[in-house]
Amino acid sequence: MSRSLRHGALAATAIAFSIVSLSACAAGNNAETLKVRPDNAATSVGTIKIQNANVITQAEPEAEGPAAVAATLFNDGTEDEILESITLPGTDVPVKLQPAKGTGPVEIPAGGRVVLGGKGNASAVIEGGREAAQDGNVQQVVFKLSRTGDVGLGAAVVPATGYYKDFGPSALPEAPAATPSGTPEAGGSETPGAPSGETPESPAAGTEQQDGTEGSTETGTTG
């Protein structure tokens, strides 16, 4: 093979290799191609792991009501942990914790987990939802645990729609509509059973009494 042909073959091979490499890089870095979705906030401290942390607001922007913290807390240790509180740095809005059943603390058993948010799970309700977080922002959330201490992370603030619908807070109930009062106006009462403007008549004279005797007797004698 001549020198020129060898150079041409090498150049063609190099170009082909470059195209394949670029294609592979494009596919590898393209999240849409790989169907990769960004993860929700997660962190770990010691034996505690927190995953899928979000602050979920009302589904409708104008809706009044609380927000909620949704997350899953894992305890890889050998001793139980108590979730003592959740705070939102930068705000003074309290977060009310409620276990899945009954009353008492929210416990993360050794080697187990606890889920915040969703039907049948523990809950963390932010009473002043609109005051504490705005959709699209990242809100710092601090979980205080009995043994591990404070574990903080930045959670995305999202409305309770789509995937988050079943994990979000409940809207405030609407006030019942006013019903008209059934009390009659003063001076306008009527006698039941009697037509308007009339009064019930008394029994006519001469009717029989209830004891069977005649209500009237003949007078005078026959001649």
Image: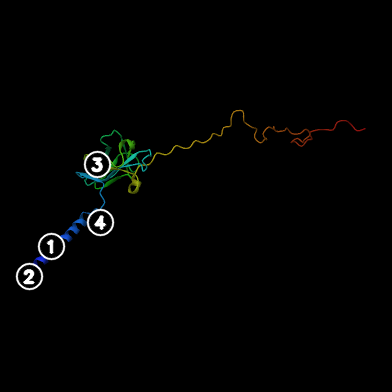
Answer with left or right where residue 205 lies relative to residue 65. Answer: right
**Residue at the extreme front:** 4
Identity, as a three-letter code, of the amino acid under mark 1: Ala
Frontmost of labels 1 and 4 is 1
* Image quarter (top left, top right, bottom left or bottom right) of the N terminus: bottom left
Lower position in the chain sequence, tag 4 or tag 2: 2
Tell me what residue is drawn at x 6 percent, y 68 percent: 3
Does residue 28 sit above or below 168 in this rendering?
A: below
Residue 144 in percent (x, y) is at 24, 38
Frontmost of labels 4 and 2 is 2
Residue 79 in percent (x, y) is at 22, 44
Identity, as a three-letter code, of the amino acid under mark 3: Gly
Q: Residues within 10 Å of mark 1 (few under 14, many from 20)?
A: few
Nearer to me, 148 or 127:
127
SS under mark 3:
strand
Q: Residues within 10 Å of mark 3 (few under 14, many from 20)?
A: some
Mark 1 → mark 2, Cα distance in angstroms: 19 Å
Identity, as a three-letter code, of the amino acid under mark 4: Thr
**Residue at the extreme top:** 187
Residue 19 in percent (x, y) is at 17, 60
- Residue under circle 2? 2
Residue 116 quadrant: top left
The numbered disc on residue 33 is: 4
Lower position in the chain sequence, tag 1 or tag 4: 1
Residue 112 in percent (x, y) is at 26, 47
Frontmost of labels 1 and 2 is 2
Identity, as a three-letter code, of the amino acid under mark 2: Ser
SS under mark 2:
loop
- Residue under circle 1? 14
Tell me what residue is drawn at x 24 percent, y 41 percent: 154
